[in-house]
Structure formats: structure tokens, C-alpha cells
């Protein structure tokens, strides 16, 4: 894209600027390596659920590692609130502070624990090293730190505010250590992970001081300040290419842990010149369930969507975030006050924030005259950490807590040029990793029966949304566990874009009294279609204290990403390949894509007839205008020229009104039933609808969106 050319101020060398910038990036990456190599938790070592960062003395970001992006917000708020909390108190090299309270320290939720260490150059404080990771247990009413049954934050965890010193001059503060370990279920693992966070910070401190020693402190400060300014300017240039205006969108958080209700996440985005304001006024009031989103997680969830859309190639530092303002009413679900519980707010409401910002940016970017900005549109990601936490005692008498990181296997939204990534993780997880089956089976008393792609999850389109994961395990080495589950994207699933269809949802079942042991003894691997069960119990979207015994099987499936463009614009050869590879059934290929696959190959004549029939069914009559067979795949979202709105696939006109939808054919259906017809699974809920808009001339699907009817 075209950007305003920038020249460096006099006295600045571009090579030195880049060397210092890349040095900072390498330092935070090395901090992450130090954490992985010193931690014993698979949440860190296998799934990468952590972040590392360096900050200046005021809490502005020097550099941030690419692991979990919404920690940008929680880490920044934690450092800034620590600076305020300890103002005037003595500090020394080797000190380290620990915090995890979402309300006072900005944590995403209590298990995401921050350790923050001051960096001294001589006697001068020149910055902070910050490391944050999900610790397996932090106390509270439920093993693992997620508490669907909590009515307040006091039941969720041991809450550590800013200013709790855990190391002093390089040595543990013993009385603090004793209090912490007395309040967690797995004290040895907890303390080892705290030490790994300290080790990460120590690595960053050594490397930063080496950099300052090489370049000189004042020179280092001048170049990092310039990096802030340049990052901000690039982002502002891209914002300027978006049409000025006010854009609105909403999403819905499902089930607060106590009641199966929907909670609105509303946002109005105002874009003026090179500045954007995200105003979440109108979102639901905070609730007494664990889905409230801390302010730190709110900031990070906004950044999660903004960075890949507008700053995908910009080195991340404080400058990236300065072009955005965030407004959130205190006491709302996106900025709660104590005693609101908050232990799953980042993965529920926070994920909905990322989804709503993606929808807003889709709406804004598609009106840009800059092709690069227009191409930042995408299907909405299946952001929904579908969690499972198992706690119990092994046959050898050892207590364990399994936070299964397979829950990160949700599908990405489809892109303008290609299908969405399968099992990509949440949009925030830049380096998402799924644990090896063998690793989970080695560390915990579980035996996997299957782990595969969830073919009922992808949003279909000219480019298909990424598929989620589905898997099942049974106990192997324990008689019973207590299970906590959450499936935040079960009923209101991820939208597609430009005619792409919504993705599927998430969920859990416990299959009671299975014949898994008999099948295994006979040398047969149980599968979903061969495993017998006395009962199949569908669990609530959020539920705790579920008992799973030997012979039972936990089955979990995870949401997929939204599609991009009308499925009838997908290349038939790609559809046939999907059928051969098992991504799409032959029936879904015919009913959803209008592609007839026989013997693994496209029947071209039957496909032309099937696609013409689907367009006729969409309109209830023969189309007036044909869609050329050579029409390029991609978004079928209407575009505007001097004469008004038109359909890119066929050139059909849609009038010149303010909203092209006024001229489109609209069909509204119950979402679950309509998606099932497309081969996509979502949990039924009254009032969750899908609105489909078609070109009345050619039958092209222009938009398909999930909507909640509150009447």
C-alpha cells in the first residue's frame, strides 16, 4: 500500500535503529526460551500460554513477544499499576513482584500470573522486565483457576495485587512464598513456574543491560523513542486510508456459569482522520458469573484484532496502541468492579471483543480505496477456548490437575486469498501450540481414543474457514476425576464475510458406561461411530464438578472459523480435493457448494446444473443474470462505484442507496437448523437467527450473519 514517506531526523542512523529494534525483539524471545526451559508445566512448555516483554520506567512497551497477544493489555496494566503502587518505595536489583488480580493488577484472569522485575543501570531505574504465564492452579473453589460456580472474585483464587514482592535482592521472600504455597493445590509445580518467570526476567535484564552498555544509555533512549514514533505513524497512515465514519457491531457472551443467558458486547467505532475510538458503551452490566472481562483483558482483546489487521508488519511497541482510544463503562461486562468474578472473562467476553472489532474493521476496511486495506477483511475467527480441566488422584495416590491445552484447537477465519488455518488457536495466539497426545498421556492418567479435525465446524465459502479440533479420552491410571468445562462459542458462532457462511460451535459430552475397554482388549481402536455407550450426556456450556469415572469417555469438539465469499464461487476442484481429503462430505459438497463429486472427481455437467439449482432456490425463481464460470473466487461483498452498488461476481447492480441491503433479497432462518443444512453444527437456542442476503438478479450470497433476536 502507499504510505507517507518518512525520513529519519538528523543524527539518526537507520542501521542502528533497526539493530536496536531487532535486539529488543530477540531479547523478549530469549526470555521466552528461558521460561520454557526452566518450567515444568505443559501449559508453558507444550502450549506456549505465556508472554514476555520489556517496558520503560513509566510502563511503555519496548518490545513484546509473539505468544499471546491479549497479554499486551494485561501486562501493560500490570506494570503501570505496579509503578503507581510502589511509588516512593525502595527498589534494588534482584527484586521481583508478583500479581494476578484482574481488578487491581489488570490480569486477564487469576491463573495468568505476572512477575515484574526492575532493571537498573548503575543506580538508575531504566525499565522493567515482565513475564506472565498461566499457572496450573492458583487456589479458589475449583482446581485449575476457572470457577463457573463462583458468584464473586473471592471464590476464584488467591488474589495478588500490585506491589507483592516475591524476590528481594535475588532471594525469595520466604513468608510470601509460604502463604502462596499454602493456598494452591500443586505447590511444587506452582513455585517452579514462579521461578521460571523470574529466570525469564533475569535473562531479559542481562541482555538489555548488555545492549545499553553497547550503545550507551542516552543513545538507546533516543532510538527507542524514535521506534515508538515510527510505529505510531505507520499505523496512523493505514487508519487514514479507512473511510471516516461511525460503525457499530455487537457480539454475545453465552452462559455466565449459573444461567444460560446471553450478554451483549456492543461497540461503536468512530474513525476520524488517523484516530480510532472504540466505545463499548451499551454492553451488558457486569454479572455474578465468571465471564466478566477485566480492563487489562479488554485492552489486549482490542489489540488482538487490531495488530494483525492494521499492524501486521509493524514491530510491536507502545507506538502501535497510541492511535486507538478505548471507552468502557465501569461496572460493565467489559470493565467490571469488585466483587465481579472474572476467571473466564478473557476467553469468553474478551474473545467476543476481538470478534466484534474484527467485524467493525471488516465493515470499515471494505470501503477503503486502498486495495491493501480492503484485503485486510476476513472471516471471523472461531475464538472460543473450549476448556476442560480434570482434577483427581492417580492409582498411585498422586494428586494432579490437568488443564488440557487441546482446547486451543479452534479454526481461523478464512482470508481473501486462502482458507482459514485449521486448529489455529484464538486470534490472540500468535504461536499457538497443541500438546502431543503422548505428552498428555505420559503426564496424566488419560488415554486418547481419537483426536481429529471437526468436519462440522468450518464456515463454508469461496475460501473455507478453518476447522476446529475434536477429541475424546478415557481414564487410564485413575478411577475418577472431577471435571470443569466451558464452551463459549456453542450457540452464537463466528460470522463469515462477504457471503462466507458462519462456522460451527463447541461443546462437551460425557459418554457413560462405554465399551472402550472391551474394544481395546479385542485390539480395536474405538472411534466415534463404533464406540458404544449406555448414555450420552450433553454438558452445559459452562459446568463444574462433573464426575467422570473409569469407563466413561469425555468427548470435546471445538468451534471453526467463518468463511469468505459465496460457497458457489469456490473452485470445484478445491471442493473435490476437500471431499477426497475428508474435510467435506460429498453431501455437503453438493448441498452447500453445488459441486457433484463422483469417484473423487468433479462431474462438471452435474455441477453446473446443481449450482444453477441452488441459485434458483435462493431466489424462488430463475436468476435474471448469470454468474460467469470464470468469476474469480473471493469476497462477494457488494462494492460501490460511481453508479452505485454492484455484485463483483456478476456485475449485477444493487442501486445507489446508502445501504445495499435495502435492494437485496433477505432470508431469515433459525441459525442452528439453517447451519445444519450446510453441514455445520451449532447448539440450538431460540432467538439466534441467521440473516442471508442475496443478489436478486444473480442469486449470489452477499452476506450471512448471525443475529440475536431479543423480541
Image: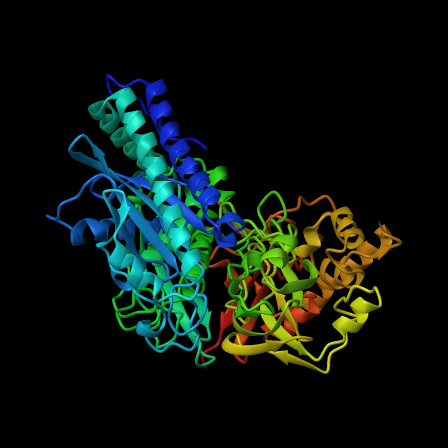
Residue at x-position 31% and y-position 26%: 210
Do we see residue 364 in this rendering? no
Q: Residue furthest front?
A: 396
- Which percent across, then down, holds residue 437? 65, 55
496 lies left or right of 229: right
- Colour scheme of the picture: rainbow
Residue at x-position 27% and y-position 42%: 170
Of 285 and 3, the residue lying toward us: 285
- Which percent across, then down, holds residue 86? 16, 51
Above-or-below relation of 267 to 78: below
Above-or-below relation of 295 to 283: above
680 lies left or right of 68: right
Q: Quadrant of the C terminus?
A: bottom left
Do we see residue 92 in this rendering? yes
Above-or-below relation of 199 to 392: above
Q: Report the number of discs.
A: 0
Residue at x-position 40% and y-position 69%: 291
563 lies left or right of 254: right
- Which percent across, then down, holds residue 663? 54, 62
Residue at x-position 42% and y-position 72%: 147
Of 175 and 353, the residue lying toward us: 175
Q: Residue furthest right?
A: 599
- Which percent across, then down, holds residue 674? 64, 71
Amino acid at each position: 500500500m502507499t504510505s507517507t514517506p518518512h525520513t529519519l531526523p538528523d543524527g539518526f542512523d537507520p542501521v542502528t535503529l533497526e539493530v536496536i529494534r531487532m535486539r529488543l525483539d530477540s531479547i523478549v524471545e530469549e526470555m521466552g526460551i528461558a521460561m520454557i526451559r526452566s518450567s515444568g508445566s505443559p501449559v508453558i512448555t507444550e502450549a506456549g500460554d505465556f508472554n514476555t516483554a520489556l517496558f520503560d520506567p513509566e510502563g511503555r512497551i519496548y518490545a513484546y513477544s509473539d505468544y499471546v497477544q491479549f497479554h499486551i493489555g494485561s501486562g501493560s496494566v500490570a506494570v503501570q499499576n505496579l509503578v503507581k503502587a510502589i511509588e516512593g518505595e525502595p527498589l534494588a536489583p534482584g527484586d521481583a513482584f508478583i500479581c494476578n488480580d484482574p481488578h487491581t493488577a489488570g490480569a486477564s484472569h487469576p491463573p495468568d500470573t505476572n512477575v515484574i522485575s526492575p532493571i537498573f543501570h548503575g543506580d538508575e531505574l531504566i525499565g522493567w522486565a515482565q513475564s506472565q504465564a498461566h499457572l496450573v492452579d492458583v487456589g479458589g473453589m475449583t482446581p485449575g483457576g476457572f470457577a463457573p460456580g463462583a458468584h464473586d472474585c473471592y471464590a476464584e483464587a488467591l488474589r495478588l495485587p500490585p506491589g507483592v514482592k516475591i524476590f528481594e535482592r535475588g532471594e525469595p521472600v520466604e513468608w510470601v512464598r509460604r502463604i502462596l504455597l499454602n493456598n494452591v493445590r500443586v505447590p511444587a509445580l506452582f513455585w517452579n513456574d514462579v521461578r521460571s518467570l523470574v529466570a525469564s526476567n533475569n535473562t531479559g535484564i542481562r541482555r538489555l543491560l548488555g545492549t545499553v552498555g553497547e550503545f550507551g544509555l542516552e543513545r538507546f533512549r533516543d532510538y527507542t523513542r524514535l521506534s515508538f514514533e515510527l510505529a505510531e505513524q505507520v499505523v496512523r497512515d493505514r487508519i487514514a486510508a479507512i473511510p471516516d465514519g461511525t460503525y457499530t457491531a455487537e457480539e454475545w457472551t453465552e452462559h455466565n456459569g449459573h444461567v444460560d443467558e446471553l450478554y451483549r458486547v456492543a461497540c461503536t467505532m468512530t474513525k476520524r482522520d488517523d484516530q480510532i475510538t472504540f466505545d463499548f458503551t451499551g454492553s451488558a452490566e457486569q454479572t455474578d458469573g465468571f465471564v466478566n472481562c477485566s480492563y487489562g483483558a479488554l485492552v489486549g482483546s482490542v489489540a488482538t484484532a487490531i495488530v494483525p489487521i492494521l499492524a501486521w508488519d509493524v514491530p510491536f511497541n507502545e507506538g502501535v496502541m497510541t492511535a486507538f482510544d478505548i471507552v468502557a463503562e465501569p461496572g460493565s461486562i467489559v470493565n467490571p468492579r469488585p466483587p465481579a468474578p472474572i476467571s473466564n472473562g478473557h476467553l469468553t467476553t474478551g474473545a467476543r471483543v476481538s470478534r466484534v472489532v474484527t467485524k467493525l474493521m471488516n465493515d470499515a476496511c471494505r470501503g477503503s480505496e486502498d486495495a491493501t486495506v480492503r484485503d485486510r477483511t476476513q472471516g471471523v475467527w472461531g475464538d472460543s477456548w473450549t476448556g476442560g480441566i480434570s482434577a483427581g488422584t492417580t492409582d498411585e495416590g498422586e494428586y494432579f490437575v490437568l488443564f488440557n491445552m487441546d482446547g486451543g484447537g479452534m479454526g481461523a477465519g478464512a482470508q481473501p486469498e486462502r482458507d482459514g488455518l485449521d486448529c489455529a488457536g484464538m486470534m490472540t495466539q500468535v504461536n499457538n501450540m497443541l500438546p502431543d497426545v503422548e505428552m498428555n498421556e505420559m503426564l496424566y492418567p488419560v488415554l486418547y481414543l481419537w483426536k481429529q479435525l471437526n468436519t462440522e465446524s468450518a464456515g463454508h465459502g469461496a475460501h473455507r474457514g478453518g476447522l476446529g479440533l475434536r477429541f475424546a479420552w478415557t481414564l487410564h491410571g485413575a478411577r475418577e476425576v472431577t471435571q470443569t468445562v466451558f464452551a463459549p462459542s456453542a450457540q452464537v458462532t463466528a460470522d463469515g464475510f462477504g457471503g462466507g457462511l458462519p462456522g460451527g460451535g463447541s461443546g462437551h459430552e460425557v459418554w457413560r458406561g462405554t465399551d472402550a475397554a472391551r474394544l481395546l482388549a479385542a485390539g480395536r481402536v474405538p472411534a466415534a461411530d463404533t464406540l458404544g455407550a449406555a448414555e450420552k450426556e450433553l454438558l452445559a456450556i459452562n459446568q463444574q464438578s462433573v464426575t467422570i469415572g473409569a469407563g466413561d469417555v469425555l468427548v470435546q469438539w471445538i468451534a471453526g472459523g467463518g468463511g469468505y465469499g459465496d460457497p458457489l464461487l469456490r473452485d470445484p476442484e478445491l471442493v473435490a480435493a476437500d471431499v477426497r481429503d475428508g474435510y467435506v462430505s460429498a453431501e455437503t459438497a453438493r448441498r452447500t457448494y453445488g459441486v457433484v463429486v463422483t469417484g473423487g472427481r468433479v462431474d462438471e455437467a452435474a455441477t453446473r446444473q446443481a449450482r444453477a439449482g441452488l441459485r434458483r432456490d435462493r431466489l424462488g425463481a430463475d436468476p435474471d443474470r448469470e454468474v460467469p464460470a470464470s468469476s474469480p473466487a473471493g469476497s462477494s461483498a457488494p462494492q460501490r462505484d460511481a453508479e452505485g452498488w454492484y455484485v463483483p461476481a456478476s456485475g449485477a447492480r444493487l442501486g445507489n442507496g446508502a445501504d445495499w441491503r435495502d435492494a437485496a433479497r433477505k432470508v431469515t432462518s433459525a441459525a442452528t437448523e439453517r447451519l445444519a443444512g450446510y453441514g455445520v453444527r451449532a447448539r440450538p437456542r431460540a432467538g439466534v437467527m441467521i440473516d442471508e442476503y442475496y443478489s436478486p438478479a444473480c442469486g449470489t450470497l452477499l452476506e450471512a450473519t448471525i443475529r440475536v433476536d431479543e423480541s
